[in-house]
């Protein structure tokens, strides 16, 4: 909630009309969700302009609105003019950041940032009242929504930061003013947009632009990241080589890190590495070993990230929320090492630009050199994923490419054995949830 003077102070808005009788205001950016009394803040994008819906907002009983043009509904009780409404939204978010004044943890990376955010939340919430970015809502609008929903008693705020180009993480860092900044890695995700691995690392390194001087930078021990991070304060680097894996089982990992033993109820060495950032943050925030250990043990993967479910005669592990070469290598290699009698279904990876075919083949070469691949059935879906199956052909147990989800689903139903464990990995655009629905028999094939 904001008072009128806070709205003006935060955004520098010009008050064009003030007939309101309200003392406090919620902000709404969606006319469909207005309950009454809010201030409507119209956002703009490439294909929409929220200021076209000012009348609709007031009809839905918004008390007033922000505008950037000199046009507004006559029956609005409060009208605030700003140069740019999205900037005003960010300024309001930053105002709340200071008003509530939590410790702010900013997290980015080419892969693993959402998982790391969830692991960090699982740990820090054992001691602190902690608030986090919902799902992967990691752009500037998601950032603002995260702070607008932050409880007044929040002690730690965890903000995930995504990017597609230069300047985006710097913008989020400016309004977040983090106390701690984490980079999980800098791989080839979005290389189609940024052109090189150096450019990706450079864009990720923007997270330290507004990191507090007394803050701490935490990162995977990566020479490319170190090359572009410009921060004079405390820096902590970690890597999987710093941990000793004691036990690997389906849905379980046990490891040593800096002389202490930890457990995760999830598989994958990459998840062990992601958890090291959470351990470091817990130590920096003076958490006990027991609190950190219990936080890691209570972590549960979110939907479509290594989500296990029984579907008819099969067990399906769905990791198809997103995919890039690094995450595909890590998750598939973990799966085929842990699960026998397994089927792997891989789909196209997006946003790799002119490097797409080469990077898909690179995944195939990586998997080809894992001994367990010779006992694994690989299906691929899509023209780019065919590059993977072309490389694996002749080395894996069985390899076949399909044009679409419907065809691979039908083939599975006709040929896969009862009890097969099936692993799904692809970019979201491949809609691999269709395979699950079709195997359930909810859609006719």
Image: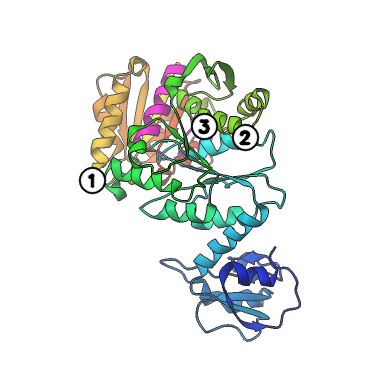
Earlier in the chain: of badge 3 and badge 1, it is 3
Question: Rounded to the nearest whole Å, what is the CA distance between mark 2 and mark 1?
Answer: 44 Å
Question: Rounded to the nearest whole Å, what is the CA distance between mark 3 and mark 1?
Answer: 33 Å
- The residue that mark 2 highlights is 285
- The residue that mark 3 highlights is 277
**What is the number of the mark on residue 354?**
1
Q: Nearer the viewer, residue 249 or 258?
A: 258
Find residue 125 and report its image quarter.
top right
Disc 1 residue crowd, few under 14, some 14–19, many 20+, Cα 10 Å: few
Residue 6 at x, y = what percent? 66, 68
Find residue 118 and report its image quarter.
top right
Earlier in the chain: of badge 2 and badge 1, it is 2
Q: Residue at x 38, y 51 (%)?
A: 164
Element marked by disc 3: helix
Give the magenta part as a residue range. 316-338
Q: Is residue 350 visible?
A: no
Q: Is residue 22 left or right of residue 50?
A: right
Q: Nearer the viewer, residue 152 or 319?
A: 152
Residue 302 at x, y = what percent? 56, 37
Find residue 343 and report its image quarter.
top left
Residue 284 at x, y = what percent? 58, 33
Question: Rounded to the nearest whole Å, what is the CA distance between mark 3 and mark 2?
Answer: 12 Å
The verdict on residue 329 being magenta is: yes
Q: Quadrant of the N terminus?
A: bottom right
Element marked by disc 1: helix
Disc 2 residue crowd, few under 14, some 14–19, many 20+, Cα 10 Å: some
């Amino acid at each position: 909630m904001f008072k009128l003077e806070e709205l003006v102070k935060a955004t520098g808005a010009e008050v064009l009309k003030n007939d309101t009788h309200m003392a406090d205001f919620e902000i709404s950016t969606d006319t469909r969700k207005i309950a009454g009394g809010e201030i409507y803040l119209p956002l703009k994008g490439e294909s929409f302009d929220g200021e076209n819906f000012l009348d609709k907002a007031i009809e839905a009983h918004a008390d007033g609105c922000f505008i950037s043009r000199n046009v507004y509904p006559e029956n609005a009780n409060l009208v605030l003019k700003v140069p740019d409404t999205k900037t005003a939204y960010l300024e309001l978010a930053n105002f709340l950041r200071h008003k509530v004044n939590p410790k702010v943890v900013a997290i980015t990376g080419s892969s693993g940032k959402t998982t790391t955010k969830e692991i960090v939340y699982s740990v820090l919430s054992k001691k602190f009242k902690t608030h986090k970015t919902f799902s992967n809502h990691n752009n500037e609008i998601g950032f603002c929504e995260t702070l607008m929903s932050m409880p007044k008693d929040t002690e730690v705020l965890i903000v995930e930061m995504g990017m597609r180009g230069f300047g985006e993480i710097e913008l989020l860092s400016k309004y977040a003013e983090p106390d701690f900044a984490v980079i999980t890695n800098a791989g080839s995700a979005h290389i189609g947009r940024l052109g090189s691995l150096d450019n990706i690392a450079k864009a990720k390194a923007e997270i330290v632009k507004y990191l507090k001087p007394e803050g701490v930078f935490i990162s995977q021990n990566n020479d490319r990241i170190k090359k572009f991070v410009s921060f004079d304060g405390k820096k902590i680097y970690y890597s999987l080589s710093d941990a000793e894996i004691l036990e690997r089982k389906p849905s379980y990992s046990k490891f040593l890190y800096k002389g202490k033993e930890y457990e995760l109820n999830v598989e994958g060495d990459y998840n062990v590495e992601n958890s090291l950032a959470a351990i470091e943050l817990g130590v920096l925030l003076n958490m006990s070993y027991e609190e950190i250990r219990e936080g890691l043990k209570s972590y549960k993967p979110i939907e479509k990230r290594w989500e296990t479910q029984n579907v008819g005669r099969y067990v399906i592990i769905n990791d198809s929320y997103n995919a890039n070469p690094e995450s595909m290598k890590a998750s598939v290699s973990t799966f085929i090492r842990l699960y026998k009698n397994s089927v792997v279904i891989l789909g196209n990876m997006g946003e790799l630009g002119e490097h797409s075919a080469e990077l898909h083949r690179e995944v195939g070469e990586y998997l080809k050199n894992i001994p367990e691949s010779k006992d694994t059935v690989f299906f691929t879906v899509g023209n780019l994923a065919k590059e993977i199956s072309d490389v694996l052909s002749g080395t894996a147990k069985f390899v076949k490419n399909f044009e679409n989800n419907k065809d691979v689903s039908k083939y599975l139903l006709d040929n896969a054995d009862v009890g097969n464990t099936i692993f799904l990995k692809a970019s979201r655009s491949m809609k691999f949830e269709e395979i699950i629905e079709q195997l359930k028999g909810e859609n006719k094939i």
